[in-house]
Amino acid sequence: MRALTEAEVRSSFVNADADDLRIMQMPHDFMLVDWDYLDFFAWREPSAGKRGYVLIQHDGEVKGVVLRVSEPGRARNGMCNICHTMQPGNQVALFAARRAGAAGERGDSVGTYICADLSCHDNVRLAHPLAPNEVRAAGQVDFRLDGTRRRMEAFVARVWEQA
Ligand SMILES: [Zn+2]
């Protein structure tokens, strides 16, 4: 992703109302974010609240969505629908996002199970580390990372696209 300022982050949300933006808290380590490394930017509210935020970049445009945890943790293990990592039940949560525009005003939302801390980016790398003798050729597409990015973009698109 290209580097974003706090103002750009705040102005990118497609499904946030004034209240959402007022109480939104930036991640504590925002100044240290390594944007080059990120395919998308996601964080949970630092104060252990029920909100999460995801930003994707599509054709140079940044779109952000506000998520709410609607089912925090399950008894059984579950798979994150974004990075496809199996997680203990308390580390995967059902997130819901109010849809943008008229659909959201009617109360429509979309939801999916995602790693509870929204750290799919790191989890997919931890779950599938390169073997010591494995060398990733420059320019070679890593399908696991690529799939994670694609699924996150598709989820965000479902939030902002007007049916
Ligand atoms: Zn995940």
Image (tube, rainbow, N blue to C red):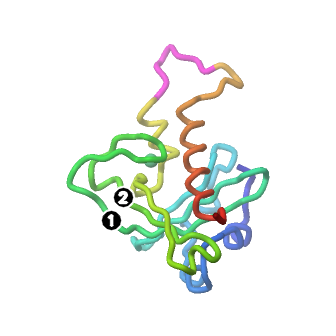
Q: What stretch is highlighted in magenta?
A: 129-136
Q: Is residue 130 magenta?
A: yes
Secondary structure beneath dot 2 equals strand
The three-letter code of the residue at mark 2 reads Ala
Residue beneath the point at 55% across and 46% down: 151
Secondary structure beneath dot 1 equals strand
Disc 1 to disc 2: CB gap under 8 Å? yes
The percent position of residue 39, horizontal first and vertical second, equals: 63, 46
Circle 1 residues within 10 Å: few <14, some 14–19, many ≥20 = some
Please give the residue where the numbered disc 1 appears in the rendered image.
71
For this orientation, the residue located farthest to the left is: 75
**Most frequent secondary structure within the magenta stretch:** loop
Viewer-proximal residue, 151 or 131? Answer: 151
43, above or below 107, in the image: above
Residue beneath the point at 42% across and 57% down: 117
Give the Cα distance between marks 1 and 2.
6 Å
Please give the residue where the numbered disc 2 appears in the rendered image.
93
For this orientation, the residue located farthest to the front is: 163
